[in-house]
Image (cartoon, helix red, strand yellow):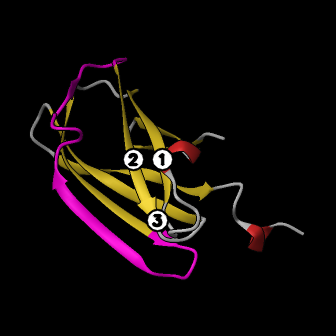
Amino acid sequence: MTWEKTTNGILIRATPHFLDDRSDVEAGRFVWAYQIEIENRSAQQVQLLNRYWRITDANGRAEEIFGQGVVGEQPVLAPAATYRYTSGAPLMTPSGLMEGYYEMQSETGEPFRALIPLFSLDSPHDTASKH
């Protein structure tokens, strides 16, 4: 499933995938990869400067991550350009949620936040959501 959200002309799509081969169910380690696609639908060039993530597991424990750029880059997107990257997230529960934002800057120097849609991390091991 893909989630998307548009803020100030910046469309962000998030697509998570559970990684069974990297997870260890008995040890309580569940791992997801997620692909992010950032599409600049605005009329200005923008640059992604920083990221903020809030990752919440099924028990309500939240971890906040703030850092420079994404995957070691601070991409610049011209109008109509798209930037994609893949990263990952481990949890100690078989499901969880992720959300956040990117701190962006327009070509005129205006800072703004591009919101990342709330998306769920679901694994086949999440028996709580199955009936």
Measure the C-alpha gap from mark 3 to mark 2. 10 Å
Q: Residue 123 lies in what quarter of the image?
A: bottom right
Q: Residue at x 25, y 19 (%)?
A: 78
With 102 as the anchor, is 108 left or right in this view? left
Q: Secondary structure at mark 2?
A: strand
- Name the mark nearer the viewer: 3 or 1: 1
Please state the total of marks drawn on the protein image.
3
Q: Amino acid at mark 1?
A: Arg
Q: Which residue is mark 2?
A: 88
Q: Where residue 59 sits: x, y (%)?
A: 55, 82
Upstream in the sequence, badge 2 or badge 1?
1
66 in magenta: yes
Q: Secondary structure at mark 1?
A: helix
> Residue farthest to the left?
109
Please say if the residues under marks 2 and 1 sit with CB atoms less than 8 Å apart.
yes
Q: Amino acid at mark 3?
A: Leu
Q: Would you say residue 129 is visible in this rendering?
A: yes
Q: Which residue is mark 1?
A: 22
Q: Residue at x 48, y 53 (%)?
A: 31
Q: Amino acid at mark 2?
A: Gly
Measure the C-alpha gap from mark 3 to mark 1. 12 Å
Q: Residue at x 51, y 53 (%)?
A: 23
Q: Where residue 74 sits: x, y (%)?
A: 15, 35
Q: Nearer the viewer, residue 3 or 85?
A: 85
Q: Where residue 30 sits: x, y (%)?
A: 52, 59
Query: What is the span of residues highlighted in magenta in the rendered image?
Result: 56-81
